[in-house]
Amino acid sequence: MGVRFALRSLILVPVLAATSAIAQQAEATGTIEVIDRIVAVVNESVVTRQELNESLRTAIKQLQKQGVQPPPPTVLEKQLLERMILNQVQLQLAKETGLKVSDTELDQTLRRIAQENRMSLPEFHAAVERDGISFNKFRDEIRDEIILVRLKEREVNNRVNVTEGEVDNFLHGQENSGDRNDEYRIAHILISVPEKADPLQRNIRRQRAETALIQLKNGAEFSEVAAEFSDAGDAMQGGLLDWRPAAQLTAKFAEVLTSMKPGELTPIITSATGYHILKLVDRRSQQSADAALVNQTHARHILVKISELTSEADARRRIIELKERLDHGAKFDELAKLHSEDGSAPSGGDLGWVSPGDTVPEFEHAMNRLKDGEISGPVQSPFGWHLIQVLEHRSKDMSDEKKRQTARQAIRARKADAAFQEWVQRLRDRAYVEYRLEES
């Protein structure tokens, strides 16, 4: 704990110095002007009142666009501060472990977002500014979002294993239960509980969940209660989740939802991460998988990544040089082993049989234009620059494989969701957090 305080003092010295300077100026002029305040100390960083106010304005605007009555500002800002603290501890871990997003990668993502909105990047820039958001701030937030996604992938998703036995059990369960083929659209409220909470803390959090449930039973809108009470990341979206198959939900959730009708609420459900309240918005039956003929491509590639050390222009130049060598008789697999920066390099860049959707759209579109034996020109994707060679094409009945792949994805998603909630709660519990909201 001594280290934490020592580190905190290093951060707070400039703040105190600035405060002293302001005080001296105030003494000379007879006025005091508050520029900003610290509302929370999170390990070795801080959250300021200005940052919290900006988040509050954005959240209120977002809720109003959705037709949701925002909670009182004092309630909402406490919810938002907790989310900002969670983001801080994750971003701090990412920084400590060297996880970063280059400007080139960020620019590619922004261009892709603009394209999805059917705008050029300058048009998108102008649209963001018209909404009252600084584009530089928006850019920083997108960078943070990418980092958080990659951190979750590295720390949680990549460590989730699904065994063939689990897939077999999943498929066996589906065969014996029609309900397991159903999909649910649910709204969700989470009242989180610290991992090492004592009985008193658990009781306080339980009472908070009961208060939320009473408000819902008295007719309050679920989205409004979620915005006020839920600790889940989707609280500002009314707690609404996309369609999910029953098998992707935890066993407790699926068991309760099976007998429910749309519009009904669950009782409070206890899990390792806290207390949950669900509302069944809708349900539907999944269509059974018939014979599924899939056009597959056997391909290999060479990848040169764009990074802090390799600019987009340098990566493209290297790919063009490799293409010239191929055109003059060099062997694709040998160049891939020597120069490709993909995990497939040791096998000569061989990707095996690729199905639609297995690769990013830019790669797939270029690959689909090639004939057997043909090599593409330089192809750019979010990963860098590629050369692609198609070895052969085939059509295959993938119904059994598709069932197993779908089962594997559902099991992985369910396990990853639970693992992430537990991981982020542990990360939060280990963090040093000092609240100063009341002082601001």
Image (cartoon, rainbow, N blue to C red):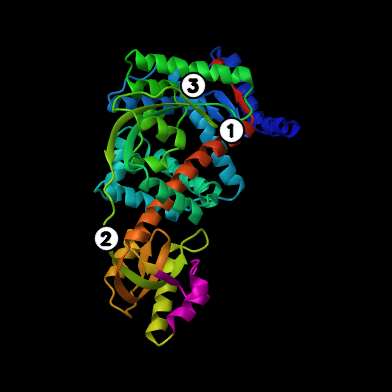
Q: Secondary structure at mark 1?
A: helix
Q: Is residue 43 visible?
A: no
Q: Is residue 232 above or below residue 324?
A: above
Q: With 142 as the anchor, is 64 left or right in this view?
A: left
Q: Residue furthest left?
A: 118
Q: Label 3 to label 2, Cα distance in Å?
A: 52 Å
| Of labels 3 and 2, the one closer to you | 2
Q: For this view, does 299 lie left or right of residue 191?
A: left
Mark 1 or mark 3, which has the lower sequence index? 3
- Work out which residue is located at the far bottom of the displayed protein and give it: 329
Q: Few, some or many C-alpha atoms within 10 Å of disc 1 (few <14, some 14-19, many ≥20)?
A: many
Q: Which residue is mark 1?
A: 428
Q: Nearer the viewer, mark 2 or mark 1?
A: 2
Residue 156, image x, y percentages: 53, 46
Give the residue number, with chain letter if any, for mark 3.
78
Judge depth for marks 1 and 3 and give the one in front.
1
Q: Where are the magenta residues, as a range?
A: 331-352
Residue at image location 33% in from the left, 70% down from the top:
297
Residue sitting at x 40%, y 35%: 254
**Quarter occupied by residue 18:** top right
- Quote the CA–CA distance across marks 1 and 3: 16 Å
- Residue 162: x percent and y percent? 50, 52
